[in-house]
Image (spheres, helix red, strand yellow):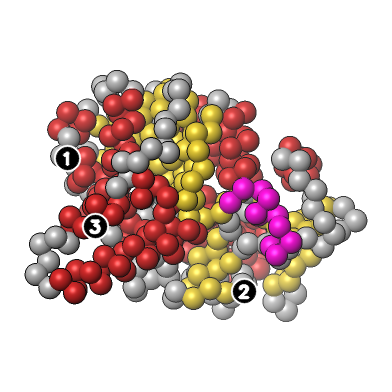
Amino acid sequence: MSGLHTLIKNKISRNGAISFCDYMEMCLYHPKFGYYNTEGMKIGKQGDYYTSAYLSTAFGAMIAKRMLEIWLKLGKGPFTIVEYGAGTGKLAADILAALQAHPELYEQLRYCIIERSPMMVSLEKERLQEKVEWHNDIAEIKGIRGCVLSNELLDNFSVHRVIMQEQLMEVFVDHCHGFKEVLRPASPALTDYFSSLNIVLPKDFQTEINLQAISWIKEVAMSMTQGYVMTIDYGDRSPEIYKSSRSAGTLCCYRNHTVNDDYYAFIGEQDITAHVNFSALSYWGQKYGLNEVVLTSQGEFLLQMGFNNWVMNAFSQEKDVATAAQKIAMLRHALVMDMGCKFKMLFQEKGMEGLDLARES
C-alpha cells in the first residue's frame, strides 16, 4: 500500500467520502506523493505518454510561426508568451529556438512559464537557460500583450464525475476494504454547468465536469490586455463529448504507454486524464471577454502553417534518401494524422479583430 493510498484512506476515515475530484487532485498533485510531484520521467519512451513536442521540433517551429504572425498583427512591440504546464521545457525550447531567427521579436520577447510541479520546474530550468521566467500564477504577470499557450494542460485538471439518474448524481470515493464509489446528489455548480450549455443528459449517462477549466479561462481572460489564447488538447465540442457512444465518460489512465480505466490502482504512479469540452471553454471564455476565433485540429493547423515544407527542408541534407523518406512519413503520420486528429486547437482573442487561420501558409 503506497503512502498516498494511506493518506487518502485516512482522510476518508476522518471526514467521510470525498468527491472524485478531490481524489484525483491528490493522486496527481499531492505535494509529496502526487504523480506530477514525484521523480521519474513522465514523457517519452521511458515515461507514460508522448507529447507532440517530444516527437519533433516541427511542432514548436509551427507554433513559433504563429507567434510571429500574432506579434506582427499586434503591431510589433513588447510581446509576452505565457505557457502553462511546460513539462520538460521541450516545447518552450523549440519555440524560442525558432524565434531567434527574428531578432526584433526575440529582443522584445518575454517568455513566462506557469508550473505547479516543482519536479517539472527543475527539468525546465535544466533545459531553458535564457529568456524564461517562472511564475506560480498568471496574476503575477501584469498586462499580458501576446499569447497564452497551453499544450495538454486542461485534460489533467481534476474533474467531477457525474451520472444522470432520477436527478444528476456525483461520484464520491469511500473506503471499506478498498476504495469504492458512492453517489450523492450533485451540487448546484454541477447542475448549472449543464443548464448553461443547454445539455440534457439521458438516463444512466456518465461523464465528467471540469470546473477548474472555467476558473482557468476566467483567470486568463482577466490577465490578458490584448492578444490570443491558444489551447491545445484532446477533446471536442459538446455534441461529440455527449454522444451515446461516450455514455461511460472519457476519463482514463496512462501508465507505461498503455491505457486503463482502473483509477484506484497505481495511486500516484499513473496519469489520469479526461477529454476537454471546448464548447464549455468557448462559452465561459466569451463570458469573460475572450472571443472564439476558430477550433481546428492539430493536423489542420500544422498543414496551414507549412509543416510539409518544414519537414522536407529539415531532412533535405539526409544522405540516405530512403531513411529521410521514412522519417518524413513517420512524422506526418504521428503529428498530422494520428495525434493531429486526436488533438484540437482552440484560438480565442481579446482586443483583436480575429486572426484568419484558414489561409494557406
Q: CA distance from mark 3 to mark 2?
A: 39 Å
Q: Earlier in the sequence, mark 3 or mark 2?
A: 2
Q: Could you tell me which quadrant the N terminus lies in?
A: bottom right
Queried whether the magenta region covers residue 242, the answer comes back as: yes
Q: Is residue 264 above or below residue 73?
A: below
Question: Which residue is under mark 3?
Answer: 311
Query: What residue is drawn where x is 55% and y is 63%?
Result: 272
Q: Residues within 10 Å of mark 3 (few under 14, many from 20)?
A: some
Q: Specify the amino acid type for callout 1.
A: Gln
Q: Specify the amino acid type for callout 2.
A: Asp
Q: Is residue 205 visible?
A: yes
Question: Between residues 290 and 325, which one lies in front from this camera angle?
Answer: 325
Q: Is residue 92 visible?
A: no
Q: CA distance from mark 1 to mark 3?
A: 19 Å
Queried whether the magenta region covers residue 113, the answer comes back as: no
Nearer the observer, disc 1 or disc 2? 1
Stretch of the chain drawn in magenta: 236-246
Question: Between residues 133 and 195, which one lies in front from this camera angle?
Answer: 195
Query: What residue is drawn where x is 30% and y is 67%?
Result: 329
Helix, strand or loop status at disc 1: loop
Question: Which residue is under mark 1?
Answer: 100
Helix, strand or loop status at disc 3: helix
Question: Which residue is under mark 2?
Answer: 262
Q: Specify the amino acid type for callout 3.
A: Val
Q: Earlier in the sequence, mark 1 or mark 3?
A: 1
Q: Is residue 310 above or below residue 8?
A: above
Q: Earlier in the sequence, mark 1 or mark 2?
A: 1
